[in-house]
Amino acid sequence: MKPPYTRLRLSIFALFTVLIGSSSCMREGKTIETQSPVETAIPVASANSDTAIPEPDSLTLQAAIPAKSAHPAAIVANSIADAETIIARKQVPILCYHQVRDWREKDSKQAKDYIIPEERFKDHIKMLADSGYQTVLPDQLLAYLTTGASLPEKPVMLTFDDTSLGQFTVAAPELEKYGFKGVFFVMTVSLGRPNYMTRAQVKELSEKGHAIGSHTWDHQNVKKYQGQDWVTQVEKPSRQLAEITGKPTEYFAYPFGLWNPEAIPELKQRGMVAAFQLAEKRDPQDPLHSIRRIIASGYWSSNSLHRAMVNSF
């Protein structure tokens, strides 16, 4: 594949979902739906204690949903792939990281899958750079999947869930050392809390060219959402992130990687043009809202990571 394509307008992607929609954080094999080591490794305060986060209704940006393109005629309908074609395209390796920090004595064996020591993380990134990988962002991936747009010869996407501080203080500088960009899925309840990123840090990541996506308000299982939950967990956090970055919030990561087909129209309605799970099979009707990733385990050496990428994608 050739160097990065000419960037498509974000607003076009919102229309992609309409056109293809009519055709319709776990390691591989993990099926738990009620609790994850993420909850132990990354505790989240209850809703009642979240007094520092403003109500999104008070934000100056009225919606996180992108406006329709001023030039819809520019979209060539027959160039947008259907679900079957999207699934047939070679998958891009997508890695998921959580906490980037050294292990502590109290960390459980299970939690260490989700906590990668600083030097090990640096080894991972160096291996990717030395092996010729180039990072891609969700806009590029979506254009490739829907139109066949070109990608670098060895693409990889680096994603970070849950907003832990080490992602800003350790991971981001390491990515920048190699000219890499990441995708940071923010859990908004955590913003400004100890050991988590602040709004200013999220904004700085966005301004440096990293992508910011939504990871809900407080990490509840999407499969259990009903009614107002979609506003609380998706709509309001998306507006808040859009206010912070000045950009639409169009990408979503499912808490625990758990999803179901019923969630997809709810996400589309709220402007999410793609959503990222973990290791389950993609939805045959809407693969863009069930894009696969793998957890980059804290136990893996750089060689183990590379083998997992090759075997999984």
Image (cartoon, rainbow, N blue to C red):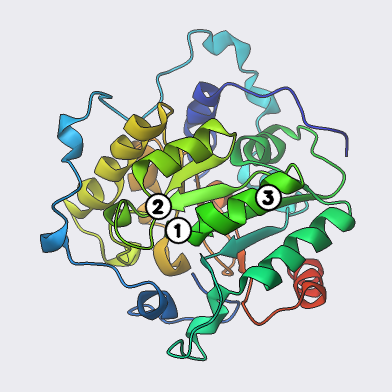
Tell me which residue sits at (88%, 39%) in the image.
1
For disc 2, the marked residue is 197
Residue 278 drawn above or below residue 291: below
Nearest to the observer: residue 134 or residue 225: 134
Mark 1 or 3, nearer chain start: 1
Q: What residue type is labelled 3?
A: Leu
C-beta proximity under 8 Å, tags 1 and 3 = no
Residue 208 placement: quadrant? top right
Given the image, on which type of amino acid does mark 2 rest?
Answer: Met
The C terminus, quarter of image: bottom right
**Looking at the rendered structure, which numbered label has been put on residue 165?**
1
Of label 2 and label 1, which has the lower sequence position?
1
Q: Does residue 82 appear to the left or right of 166 in the view shown?
A: right
Q: Which label's residue is closer to the chain start, 2 or 3?
A: 3
> Which mark is on residue 175?
3
Q: Is mark 1 on a helix, strand or loop?
A: loop
Alpha-carbon distance for marks 2 and 3? Answer: 17 Å
Mark 2: few/some/many CA within 10 Å (<14, 14-19, 20+) = many
Circle count? 3
Residue 195 occupies quadrant: bottom left
Classify mark 1: residues with Cα within 10 Å, few (<14), some (14-19) or many (20+): many
Cα distance in 3D space between marks 2 and 1? 5 Å
